Structures are given as structure tokens and as C-alpha cells.
Image (spheres, grey):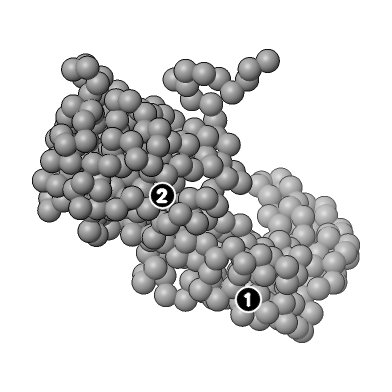
Amino acid sequence: MRFGAVPLSEAEGAILAHSVALPKGRLRKGVLLDAAALGKLEAAGVHQVTVARLDADDVHEDQAAERLAQALVPDPAAVHLRLAPASTGRVNIYATQTGVARIDAARINAVNAVHPMVTVATVPEWHRMAARGMVATVKIISYAAPEAAVAAACAAGQDALALSPVTRKRALLIQTSVGGRDDSAKGQRAMAQRFDRMGVSLGPKTVVPHQTEALRQVLSEAVPAYDILCVLTGSATSDLHDIAPEAVRAAGGAVVHYGMPVDPGNLLFLGHLGDVPVIGLPGCARSPALNGADWVLERLLCDVPVGPQDIMGMGVGGLLKEPPSRPAPRETA
């Protein structure tokens, strides 16, 4: 691509590089300078403009952005995404359903390493998306990109983006009470908000004594009716063999992990009863603020597998905002 200032007599067929104010309105950058556009500039007393001229091996920014977006998402409907029309070298990519974004970071990084003019920006991997939320934007930075770079980027980014929609639509929150106290209202409200934004129906308020047998019974009864179970105990789960994990085992399930390197959210455990995931929520789930359990819950609602290695890999970026409800601040001195 050739770039620079030229007299109007040499500008026809070039791309206007900088917007020009006219007596009525403006001629915006990126426009192809045809005879009509040049006439407006001449009538406004403009004698010289800065333009970009594409070389034979250049691809116009809109065409390049469209090609790359189609490579990143070859079949948008199949992966619950939508590609917007290309404009000014940009194609935005949107979710069509509620879910979590599947981002192949290695492929996106490979695309962005091909050529400075060829770029893709995305939300973080596994980011919660609402329908019509923007998952990614493809941007050709300046008017055109070399054909070889566009082709290489398309090859590097093949199938790099998708959305996993919510598939587990029925949830039950089970809370336990200590000493007969029912302090469940706050947790019920916060979790109801979480499920509502994911389009998941929450079962009736369920509170049982903080005892293994009482919790075991309600877990066993809940399995046929719900796709996911959450347990929020009146006394924090402090060990892999505390009351709530033991109740999951007593109900015939398994506990696969306890603890996570996300703060707030450390005291989470993950198990299952058959095919139904069971999340032992940390106490911070009583607050609507983001915590580690959100990352696990959102993925499981979308049938994205979560195992011990996934949870233990959440530490980088896992230092989250201090919730106002935290009883003991991190700052001690």
C-alpha cells in the first residue's frame, strides 16, 4: 500500500486517508475518491489530500476483515455466533444465545502475530455472554492488508471462536441452617440473580439442618428433577470430608475437588451425582459480586467440562474484587 499527500489531479481512485471538512458536512476517511468526491473537494477549495493506494497484492480492508471473520467462524449458526457486515475494515462477531465464549487463545495469538495490520480482539476465554453480546471484533487497521498476510491469518485462525450455550436449564439451591437459624434469604437472592441471567430456572427455596443425613436426603431426592445442584452451607465447608462433601458421597455421588485458587471463592468443592454436577458454594456466593464459583457454575451450565486441573489453573486472574461482605479483609497491616 502506498500512502501520502497528492494533488487532487492525481487522487482519483485512491482512498481518502483523513476526513476533510466541507461547507456542508464532511468527506469521511476511507471513502473511494471518485469524480463526485473530487468535485466536492475542489468546490471546497481543497487542492491536496492524503490518500492510500492499494498495490496489486493488497486486499481491501472490508474484504480482508470479512475473509478472516469467516475463517474464525466458518459456520456461525452451528456455533451460536453471528457475523456483522464488514465496515471500515471491521467485522464484529456476536453471540446469538446466552452461554460462554469458547476462545482458542493459541489460534487468536497466531492470527495477531501474522501482520500488524491484521488484528482480532476477543473477550476472555469462557467469558459469560448474553445473547447479542460481542464476542470478538476483527479489524484491519489501515485500509488494506497484503494478500499473503490475509491468507496466513485465515489459515492460523480457522475455527478459533465458538459459543457454548446454556444446556442445563433446571437448578436447585440447597442451603443448610445451623442451630435452627434460617439465614437463607441473602443467598437465595444472589443465586437467583445468577441463574436468571443465564436463563436457568431455580427450584423452590430449600433449607435443611446442617447435618449429613438431612442434606443427603434432599440431594438424593433432587437428582431426577434438576440438571445441576448447588449447596450453600450455613457453616463454611472446611475440609474435603466436611458435612456437605460427605452428604454427596452418602447420596451415592463423588467429590472430585475441594478448594480453588480464586479469591473470593477459595472454599468451593465440586462433585457429581451421576450426570448431575454438584457445586459446594463458598460463603461469598451470598453476595452478587463475582467470585470463583461463578466461573465454575457458568461453564457447567453450558456443559463445558470442569475438572481439578481446570480449577487449579484459575489462579492467574483469580484475585478478584474485594466484596463488601467479606468479614476479614486481606489487608492486615
Q: Residue 134: x percent and y percent?
A: 48, 53
Question: Residue at label 1?
Answer: 156
Q: Residue at x 77, y 60 (%)?
A: 17
Which mark's residue is nearer the viewer, 2 or 1?
A: 2
| Residue 285 visible in the snapshot | no
- Front residue of 265/308: it is 308
Q: Which structural element holds mark 2?
A: strand
Three-letter amino acid code of the residue under disc 1: Ala
Q: Residue at x 47, y 21 (%)?
A: 326
Question: Residue at label 2?
Answer: 257
Q: In terms of image quadrants, where is residue 157?
A: bottom right
> Disc number at residue 85?
none
- Front residue of 241/201: it is 241
Q: In terms of image quadrants, where is residue 14?
A: bottom right
How many callouts does the rendering have? 2
Few, some or many C-alpha atoms within 10 Å of disc 2 (few <14, some 14-19, many ≥20)? Answer: some
Determine the residue located farthest toward the front in the rendered image.
241
Q: Which structural element holds mark 1?
A: helix
Q: Residue 266: x percent and y percent?
A: 47, 36
